[in-house]
Image (cartoon, rainbow, N blue to C red):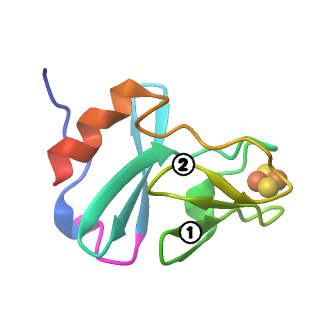
Amino acid sequence: MSFVEVAKMDEVPEGSMKHVEEGDTEILLVNVEGKIYAVSDRCGHMNARLSMGRLQGTTVICPLHASQFDVTTGKNIKEPVLTSIPGEEKVPALKKYSERLE
Ligand code: FES
């Protein structure tokens, strides 16, 4: 497996989010208690960039309509969006980003 460096650890301080791109893939990196999570940076509702939203613990809140997602699983935890954001389990290519940044 090859890796692509998308960020340095010090660019994603604990409790913060960062938007990065690799090719056509927009990625949201989140540092939760020193562990980096990588999920899609686009909300499944109306395509807002989640990195423009707010982070509360492991929850990212969409900037447009306030759907909430758990960044550790990608699961939706509050409507209006009913679908989860793609995470490692749905977008295998993102797994390499998480592994590389640990
Ligand atoms: Fe994210 Fe509407 S665009 S909740």
Q: Mark 2 points at which residue?
A: 74
CA–CA distance between discs 2 and 1?
A: 9 Å
Query: Is the N terminus in the top left, top right, bottom left or bottom right quadrant?
Result: top left
- Asked if residue 14 lies in the magenta stretch, the reply is yes
Q: How many labels does the image show?
A: 2
Q: Which residues, given as a range, are shown in magenta?
A: 11-16
Instruction: Determine whether, in the image, residue 63 is placed left or right of residue 13.
Output: right
Q: From the top left corner, tell me how far across and down residue 95 is, in percent.
A: 31, 35
- Tell me the element at label 1: strand
* Residue occupying the point 19% across, 40% down: 5
Q: Label 2 sits on what residue type? A: Gly
In the image, farthest residue toward the top: 1
Q: Residues within 10 Å of mark 1 (few under 14, many from 20)?
A: many
Q: From the top left corner, tell me how far across and down residue 55 is, in percent.
A: 54, 74
Q: Main secondary structure of the magenta part?
A: loop
Mark 1 CB near ligand 1 (8 Å cut):
no
Going from N to C along the chain, the mark reached first, 2 or 1, is 1
Mark 2 CB near ligand 1 (8 Å cut):
no
Front one among 92 and 48: 92
Image vertical order of residue 83 relative to residue 22, above or below = below
Front one among 22 and 30: 30
Q: Label 1 sits on what residue type? A: Thr
Q: From the top left corner, tell me how far across and down residue 48 is, in percent.
A: 72, 50
Q: Name the residue under label 1.
A: 59
* Residue occupying the point 19% across, 43% down: 99
Q: How crowded is mark 2: few (under 14 residues within 10 Å), some or many (20 or more)?
A: many
Q: Which picture quadrant has residue 94? A: top left
Q: Which picture quadrant has residue 63? A: bottom right
Q: Which picture quadrant has residue 91? A: top left
* Residue occupying the point 26% across, 64% down: 35
